[in-house]
Image (spheres, rainbow, N blue to C red):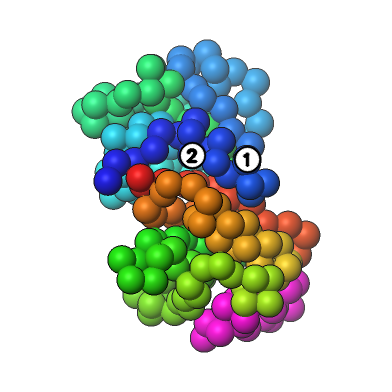
Amino acid sequence: MQQLNFEKSLALLKKYKIKFVEFKAIKTEKDLDGVKYPIVLKVFSEKIVHKTDKGGVVLDLRNKDEAIKAFKRLKKISAEGGSASGGRNVLMQPMVSQKQEVIIGMKKDPQFGPVIMFGLGGIFVEVIKDVSFRICPVSKKDALEMIKEIKSYKVLTGLRGKQSVNINSLADIIVKLSELSLKEKVEEIDLNPVMVSSKEAFVVDVRVMQ
């Protein structure tokens, strides 16, 4: 398997109307002029599969000095990884806060075909393994059941005065990913994280393997 480049991965999401966070490819320090902070900078290279493992994601940059320092470090990481992105090897996104983080993914099973996975992000997936699965095709009803099946579902419905997130918007992404998985030649897809609020849900990072 090999990782699909960012442009093609993004085109796939756009084709199936899966919303992606705003972003900009950064080539020089001057591209950081006039930026509205806080921001996130990421390594922009399909040759680096797991960006966080390489220190390739820097969160909550509050001013230009912090951003320039992070930009230089990420350029170096990208170069060491053998970036194939034509110099556009740092990606800028707005820092998303006050939203719940979830993960939605797909992996093709040799026996069952595409299988969709849903869970809360961070420790819930990595340590607790609190996830649910469905074999494609996944209907809207199936998607809603998937979301409600996880043990930490109450986190999404609002705890300690927090608003409930938009469950329907998450279910819509699951259904669209199911459709994509059945129609496109892909082996694995990670939408991680997906950020969801009371109003909307959108993908912050994507990894597609063919």
- Residue 97: image x %, image y %? 62, 54
Please say if 117 is above or below 16. below
Q: How many marks?
A: 2
Q: Amino acid at mark 2?
A: Ser
CA–CA distance in space, label 1 to label 2? 9 Å
At horizontal 67% and vertical 57% (from top left) the residue drawn is: 201
The answer to whether one can see residue 98 in this image is no
- Residue 9: image x %, image y %? 48, 39
Q: In the figure, is residue 51 to the left or right of 10?
A: left
Q: Nearer the viewer, residue 109 or 47?
A: 109
Residue identifier under label 1: 14
Q: Is residue 156 magenta?
A: yes
- Residue 94: image x %, image y %? 61, 39
Residue identifier under label 2: 9
At horizontal 44% and vertical 68% (from top left) the residue drawn is: 115
Please say if 123 is above or below 59. below
Provide the secondary structure element on which disc 2 rests. Answer: helix
Q: Is there CB contact under 8 Å for labels 1 and 2?
A: no
- Residue 54: image x %, image y %? 27, 43
Please say if 58 is above or below 116. above
At horizontal 54% and vertical 17% (from top left) the residue drawn is: 31
Query: Which region of the structure is painted magenta?
Result: 144-164
Q: Amino acid at mark 1?
A: Lys
Q: Nearer the viewer, residue 78 or 118?
A: 118
At horizontal 40% and vertical 42% (from top left) the residue drawn is: 57
Task: Residue 20: name its quadrant.
Answer: top right
The answer to whether one can see residue 178 in this image is yes
Q: Nearer the viewer, residue 103 or 72?
A: 103
